[in-house]
Image (cartoon, grey):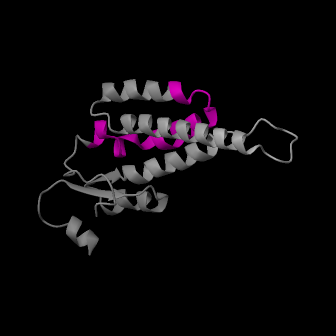
């Protein structure tokens, strides 16, 4: 049914929004060759945030201690939460950049903040940025998607 709707005789530019499921991504182009494929920015942000949370976990500086000081743990948890919030805020600036030059500036800021966390930065560069044209505003705003950039709306 979906293929029938998207292959209708109306001469409109069609857009499909999916999450980053590789099997689905691999099928969209061959089955719907005239359809623009946008990736759900919400799901990508969720993945970036999850990776950020796991990679930025700050451990208490008590290497041989069996008992972790409650105050130290709470301070580290608060510090961790602040770092994650800062990264997610800057990530949103990157994704929501309306023009490519604004994207470049936001990306430099993101790299600067993430510099101490090279594993996370490499993850973003090698997995997420490869498909930036499919979910970042600087590129998706060039196609008519009527504001639908997330599968949550559907």
Residue at 58% x, 27% y: name it: 115
Query: Can residue 57 be seen in the rendering of this structure?
Result: no
Q: Nearer the viewer, residue 117 or 128?
A: 117
Residue at 62% x, 28% y: name it: 116
- Judge whether 112 appears above or below 6 on screen: above
On the image, the x and y values in percent for residue 57 come to 65, 42
Which residue is outermost to the bottom? 1
On the image, the x and y values in percent for residue 52 come to 56, 43
Q: Quadrant of residue 140?
A: top left
Q: Quadrant of residue 61?
A: top right
Say if the magenta span includes residue 135: yes
- Quadrant holding the C terminus: bottom left
Does residue 123 appear to the left or right of 92 in the view shown?
right
On the image, the x and y values in percent for residue 25 come to 42, 57
On the image, the x and y values in percent for residue 101 come to 32, 24
Does residue 51 appear to the left or right of 109 in the view shown?
right
Q: Nearer the viewer, residue 60 or 87?
A: 60
- Judge whether 102 appears above or below 44 on screen: above
Say if the magenta span includes residue 10: no
Read off the magenta span. Answer: 112-140
Query: Can residue 61 be seen in the rendering of this structure?
Result: yes
Which residue is outermost to the front? 71
> Main SS type for the magenta part?
helix
Q: Nearer the viewer, residue 154 or 62?
A: 62
- Quadrant holding the N terminus: bottom left
Residue at 65% x, 43% y: name it: 74
């Amino acid at each position: 049914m979906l293929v029938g709707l998207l292959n209708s005789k109306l001469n409109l530019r069609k857009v499909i929004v999916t999450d980053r499921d590789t099997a689905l991504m691999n099928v969209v182009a061959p089955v719907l060759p005239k359809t623009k494929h946008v990736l759900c920015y919400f799901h990508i942000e969720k993945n970036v945030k999850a990776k950020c949370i796991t990679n930025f976990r700050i451990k208490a500086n008590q290497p041989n201690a069996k008992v972790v000081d409650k105050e130290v743990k709470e301070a580290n948890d608060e510090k961790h939460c602040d770092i994650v919030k800062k990264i997610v805020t800057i990530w949103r600036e990157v994704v929501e950049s309306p023009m490519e030059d604004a994207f470049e500036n936001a990306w430099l800021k993101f790299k600067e903040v993430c510099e101490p966390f090279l594993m996370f930065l490499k993850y973003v560069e090698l997995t997420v940025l490869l498909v930036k044209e499919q979910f970042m505003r600087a590129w998706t705003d060039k196609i008519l998607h009527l504001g639908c950039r997330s599968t949550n709306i559907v």
